[in-house]
Amino acid sequence: MPEDIIILKFGGSVITDKKSEIPKVNHKVLDRICNILKDKERNMIIVHGAGSYGHPIAKRYALAEGLNGSQEQKKAIKEARKQVHELNQLLCGRLQESGIETKSVIPSQSMRTRGSRKIENFPVHEFDKPLKEGKIPVTFGDVTEDLIQGINILSGDVIMMELARIYEPRLTVFVMDYPGVMKGRPEDEKSEIIPLVDSETRESIKKYYGEERITDVTGGLVGKLECAARIAEHSQCWITNLDHLEDCICGDFHGSRVIP
């Protein structure tokens, strides 16, 4: 098994137009990702979000709340899975064109959940095999079967938690829209990066990002930071943007470091 594994998570809002009500990928961002990764060591795992490939339909049909027995929801589950798989294939295809061998790991085919934060029977072999072959496993947030409520949304952040526990990577990076966790409104030009996100910082952010500000079906920034804190028990964990990703991979860190 390769040592010094790196786990990268590309947010759905980075690789897609998340505000779009229909699936819309950001081709320029996919090209940038390939340019950054093509000359790097291949001992890494990539996780990506869904963005406009899944979030609108998941929200519209309340997929995070479980099965309701309606035919409309059954069709929505099928469509959401199709969309996120399509996004995965777009990313993997672009990486392959850049000479980076990948292997898709499709959560709805290999993982079941017991609630939104627990994965039953995590398929370690589906990551071990490509890693041993010098390929990059690429997985993503998906609609999974759930042992409690029939279905659930398994976020890429929760998959990251499990991967960090299993592989204890030397580095985990969340690549987001902003260059780190921001103090105040991220869109405000005067907003500054919080360089170290500890438990006290997370509590203050939780108060600021009340329920009315959470629009993401996977819990938004609050949920992400809770996952990142768990990841930080096993790995150095950073939140940054695409502009600083290459520097972070090379050990020149910019952004917010998350600690337990």
Image (cartoon, rainbow, N blue to C red):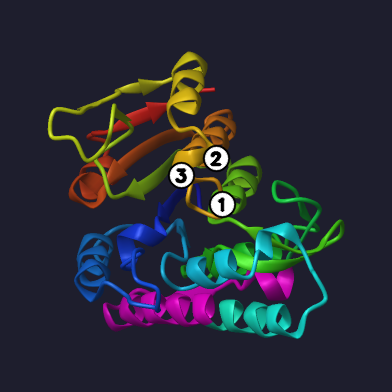
Which corner quadrant of the image does residue 201 belong to? top left
- From which residue to which does the magenta span run? 83-110
Q: Please give the residue where the numbered disc 1 appears in the rendered image.
A: 218
Distance of label 1 from label 2 (alpha carbons): 7 Å
Residue on which the image places disc 2: 223
Secondary structure under the numbered disc 1 in the rendered image: loop
Where is residue 260 drawn, in percent x and y? 54, 22
Give the x, y percent position of residue 226.
56, 33
Considering only vertical position in the picture, is 228 above or below 61?
above
Q: Residues within 10 Å of mark 2 (few under 14, many from 20)?
A: some
Rendered view: 10 above or below 144: above
Could one spot residue 149 in this view of the protein? yes
Residue type at mark 2 is Gly
Q: Is residue 7 left or right of residue 162?
A: left
Secondary structure, mark 2, is helix
* Mark toward the start of the polypeptide (3 vs 1): 3
Residue receiving disc 3: 4
**Mark 2 → mark 3, Cα distance in angstroms:** 26 Å
Say few, some or many: other residues with alpha carbon within 10 Å of mark 1 (under 14 / 14 to 19 / 20 or more): many
Question: Circle 3 sits in a helix, a strand or a loop, which is it?
Answer: loop
Picture coordinates of residue 45, whole percent (x, y): 48, 58
Is residue 88 magenta-colored?
yes
Is disc 1 in contact with disc 2, using a CB cutoff of under 8 Å? yes
| Residue found at x 50% / y 65% | 55
Residue located at (58% from left, 43% from top) = 164
In this view of the protein, which residue sits in the foreground, 181 or 233? 181
Residue flagged by tag 1: what amino acid is it? Thr
